[in-house]
Image: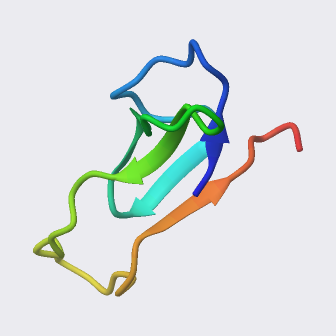
Amino acid sequence: MCVFNTGYPVFREASNFADQAGVFEIHDTMDAQHKLAMQQVVPEYPIVWCGDAQVPVSVIGNANW
């Protein structure tokens, strides 16, 4: 689980994450210590037209790293 600062927009994609298999959004955890976290929001395996990962994958980073 990735934790984000309070004030980060919820129900949006996280900056510097590129979802490759699966869909993730920022959600409120209702936890005082870890207020926001990235959560997988589509748990169903999609219909694919070519080979795809069997598990959710999100690449972390940006072009300047």
Seen as rendered, the residue at the extreme front is 32
Tell me what residue is drawn at x 33 percent, y 62 percent. 22
Tell me what residue is drawn at x 59 percent, y 46 percent. 17
x then y, percent, for residue 56: 40, 71
| Location of residue 33 by image quarter | top right
x then y, percent, for residue 7: 57, 12
Foreground pick, 46 / 24: 24
The colour scheme of the drawn protein is rainbow
x then y, percent, for residue 65: 89, 44
Residue 16 visible to the viewer: no
Tell me what residue is drawn at x 61 percent, y 19 percent. 6
Seen as rendered, the residue at the extreme top is 7
Tell me what residue is drawn at x 44 percent, y 39 percent. 29
Seen as rendered, the residue at the extreme left is 47
Q: Is residue 18 above or below residue 58?
A: above
Q: Is residue 46 above or below residue 23?
A: below
Quadrant occupied by the N terminus: bottom right
**In-image side of 1 versus 50 (left or right):** right
Numbered circles on residues, count = 0
| Location of residue 48 by image quarter | bottom left
Q: Is residue 34 above or below residue 18?
A: above
Residue 10 visible to the viewer: yes
